[in-house]
Amino acid sequence: MKGDKSFVDHIRIRCKSGDGGNGIVSFRREKFVPRGGPDGGDGGDGGQVVIKVDENTDNLRAFHYDPKLIAENGAQGQTYKRHGKNGKTAIGRVPPGTVIYKSPAVTVTDAVAMERSEGGIDLEPVIDLTEHGQEITLCVGGKGGRGNFHFRTSTNQVPQEREMGTDGTEGIFYLELRRIADAGLVGFPNAGKSTLLGKLSAKKPKVASYPFTTLTPQIGVVPLGGHVRCTLADIPGLIEGAHENRGLGHEFLRHITRCRVLLFVVDMAGSEGRDPIADVQTLRTEIKMYDEDLAKFPWMVIANKMDLEASTENLEFFKQRFPKVRIVSISADKEEGLDKVKDALEEIMEKQENA
C-alpha cells in the first residue's frame, strides 16, 4: 500500500553474504613480449551483511516488504594482475533497542515449519543493539580466490592453477525491538492518548471519536529541558480481557513491555460512561495478568479531559482511591497542563538515567 506507515517491532529476515570471486588463469600477451608470464588477478571478496543502529529509525518497517539482506558477490580477477571488485556490503538499519536472534534454520521454509511446530523454535541471542552507530556483521563475505600469478615458480613459469572464491555465509535471523520508546501512553480507546501525543510532539496521529483509531504504536519525540528529549509512544487502546488476547490484546501488551515508563491516560470526566477508577484498576490488572514484571514498571496517571463537567469531582474520588500515585491533571484538547506532563517526564527520565 502506497504510503503505508505500519509499525513493525519484530520480524524474521534472511541474510546472505556475497561469494568470493574466482581467481583467473591469464598470461601477459604484448606485441614484443611473446612469452609473458602469468598475470591472472585475484577474485574480489564477497560483500558482508551488516546491521547498523540508526537513531533516525523508530521501527523495523524497512524490512516489512523485503525481509532479506543479500550482499553482492565479489567479481572474478582480471588480466594484468588486476583484482576483481569486492562485493557491496548489504546494510540494514535498525533503531536503538533492537535485539537480534539467530535461528537454527537455514531456510525461511525451515524456520516457518519450526515456528509452527509443537515444540516451537529455539533462538540464539546474538546481540542487544543500544547505541547510535553501533553495528554488527551477521554474515561474513566469502574470500576471493587467487589468480595464477601467485602459483608461478622457478620450475613452473606457465601455471594453470588458480583458486575458486569461497562461498559466503547465510542464515535466518529474528529482529525484535526491546524498547520502542522512553514512555508509553496506555489507556482505553478514546482516553485522549493520540491527542496528547500530537500536542506534545510533532507527531500527527489519527484522532477520531471511535475506538481503535490507533491500530499501531505512534512514536513522537518530546523536547524537554536543554538538549534532552523523550520518545513517547501512543500504544493502541486496550480493552478488558487483553491478557487473554481479546482485541489484539497480546500484540498491544507486547508494545507496552518495550517502554521504560508507563503513563496511564484516563478520561477523568467519564465522558463515554466510563469510571476512571475502574479503568485504571482494569488496566493494571490486565498488565499484571500478562506479565508480573511489567506491573513493576514506573507509572503515573495523566488525568485528561479536565475541561469537561464532572472531571473535578471524579478527580477527588480518584485521589482518595490512589493516594500514593502521581497524578497530572490536563486537558490535551485545550492544551492545558502540558508543561506539567513535560516536567514529570523530565523528572522520571532523570531518575531512570541515575538508577
Image: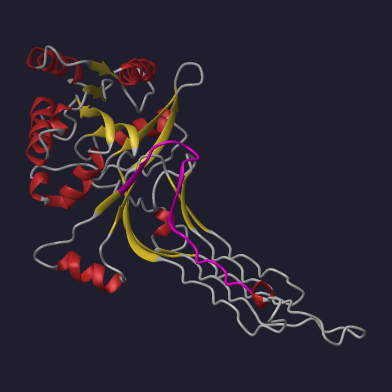
* Image vertical order of residue 331 relative to residue 272, above or below: above
Q: In this view, does 347 lie above or below 266?
A: above
Instruction: Name the residue located 26 percent from the left edge and 25 percent from the top edge.
Output: 305
Q: Tell me if residue 192 can be seen.
A: no
Q: Is residue 255 left or right of residue 91?
A: left
How far from the left and from the top, in percent, is residue 148?
66, 78
Image coordinates of residue 179 in percent, x first then y, are 32, 38
Q: What scheme was used to colour the molecule? A: secondary structure
Magenta includes 127? Answer: yes
Q: Which residue lies furthest to the front in this view?
A: 155
Examine the structure image and report whether residue 353 is included in the region drawn in magenta: no
Residue 230 or residue 76, whichever sits in front:
76
Q: Is residue 16 left or right of residue 284?
A: right
- Quadrant, the N terminus: bottom left
Left or right: residue 281 versus residue 7 is left
Residue at figure coordinates x 24%, y 29% from the top left: 262
Q: Residue 152 appears in which quarter of the rendering?
A: bottom right
Quarter containing the C terminus: top left
* Residue nearest the viewer, comparing 60 with 174: 174
Q: Please say if 205 is above or below 123.
A: above
Instruction: Tell me which segment is drawn in magenta.
Output: 126-147
Q: Where is residue 130 in the image (x, y as percent from the top left)?
A: 39, 37
Name the residue located 91 percent from the left edge and 86 percent from the top edge: 31
Give the residue drawn at x 16%, y 48%: 249
